[in-house]
Image (spheres, rainbow, N blue to C red):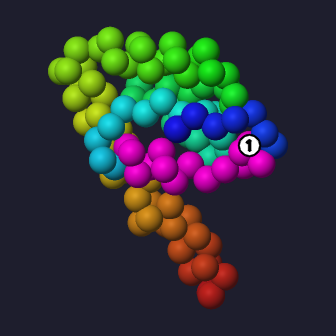
Amino acid sequence: MHLPNRDVWRHASPLKVAEFAAAGLPVVASEVSGLEPYRDAEWLTLIPLGDDEACKVALVDLCGLSREERLRLGALAQEDAKNRMSWEHCTASLHEMLIEVKR
């Protein structure tokens, strides 16, 4: 998911990255807010907004991997999506806060 270098994209939702990860796909994406927790994930390659050359290099690198390696990265992405990107996970801290407020 490559985005142009515009201020509006700096605060874009990382929902598509979560959807691709849940589908078991390694991801090349522009660096937007919300992806910080996954910065070091092996399955995710972050590129600067609007950097067409970095996007090209990242995609060529990904395509150059063996099928087995792409499947391995996809499995890691899917596991991360299940453990750290599910709605249950994302809303857990909100739920805890609401329970605390209720007391």
Q: Quadrant of the C terminus?
A: bottom right
Out of 79 and 73, give the one closest to the viewer. Answer: 73
Identify the residue shown where x is 24% and y is 19%. 69
**Residue 84 image point, x, y percent:** 43, 50
Q: Residues within 10 Å of mark 1 (few under 14, many from 20)?
A: some
70 over 78 or under it: above or below? above
Identify the residue shown where x is 39% and y is 45%. 20
Residue 66 picture quarter = top left
Identify the residue shown where x is 29% and y is 41%. 24
**Residue 43 image point, x, y percent:** 39, 29
**Residue 59 image point, x, y percent:** 44, 20
Examine the structure image and report whether residue 19 is included in the region drawn in magenta: yes
Secondary structure that dominates the magenta span: helix
Q: Which residues are magenta?
A: 8-21
Direction right: furthest residue: 7
Name the side, left or right, on which 68 lies relative to 7. left
Q: Amino acid at mark 1?
A: Arg
Identify the residue shown where x is 22% and y is 29%. 71
Examine the structure image and report whether residue 13 is included in the region drawn in magenta: yes
